[in-house]
Image (cartoon, grey):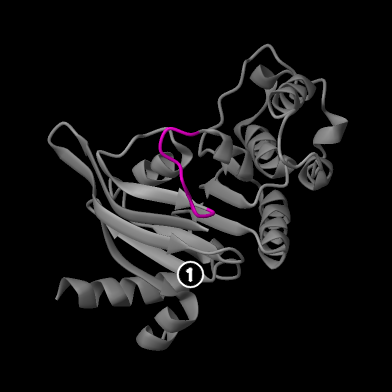
Amino acid sequence: MIIAKDIIKRFGNLKALNSVSLTFSKGECVALLGPNGSGKTTLIKSILGMVVPDSGTIHINGASIAGKWMYREHIGYMPQIGRYPENMTIANVIDMMRDIRKGSHNQHHDEDLINSFGLNNMLQKKMRTLSGGTTQKVSASLAFLFNPDVLILDEPTAGLDPLSSEILKQKIIKEKQNGKLILITSHVLSELDDLITEVAYMQEGSLVFHKKLSLLKEETGEQKLAKAITKIMKVEQL
């Protein structure tokens, strides 16, 4: 569904992506992991068309994304920190996004999270009055709203209370079972154990490994993602 091949991106003297090649398939939930500065965000922004690679290609559903933007209709993106017009209400923001996406390939609107998070009871609240956690709920709801084929979730549970975090995790599992491709970045590895099927680990702009979670557990003898990652990175560094 997404094929990135030999992606290189420099920012001045910094090589943010060093010939990165990855293939992500539908029905998979992939953890995109690595320390700060590893290239995760640059890769995500390259897939979204927000960053143009210096070289390499990215194909989504068999078509190159170079110079195109309509493909984004198939992607739901939840940024780590959502920024919205402060004077707008939650309802205004949702309506604005519906208006922007009016010509979207899929007119079925998925309001599960709007209702599960209780946003339907606070639609007239202005964005400037919302807590960080409630703003995260708005971002999550918008990512899923247009029933996209691909979901890219950047630190999705950051700032969410335990109940809301669990609601979001159950939604992710449901959409994975519906055949969606889901990419997740997170520093809280314990929250990924029940969600993901694959792990892609990056460091200093390069892809260190991309494995099925089951294979990673088998190779390391660890059942918890955090311990498996720690063990395999110790081996890589030897």
Residue 66 forms part of the magenta stretch? yes
Residue 225 as seen in the image, left or right of residue 140: left
Determine the residue positioned at 64% across, 30% down. 131
Give the image location of residue 217, x and y in percent: 44, 82
> Up-down: is 145 above or below 202?
above
Mark 1 residue type: Glu
Q: Is residue 153 above or below residue 222?
A: above
The stretch in magenta equals: 61-68
Is label 1 in a helix, a strand or a loop?
strand
Along the viewing direction, whichever of 69 and 181 lies nearer the viewer: 69
Image location (x, y in percent) of residue 184: 51, 54
Q: How crowded is mark 1: few (under 14 residues within 10 Å), some or many (20 or more)?
A: many
Quadrant housing residue 33: bottom left
Residue name at image x 72 percent, y 30 percent? 103
Q: Which residue is drawn at 38% across and 54% down?
A: 4
Q: Nearer the viewer, residue 21 or 223?
A: 21
Look at mark 1 in the image and give the residue it sits on.
198
Of residue 22 and residue 112, the one placed in the foreground of this image is: 22
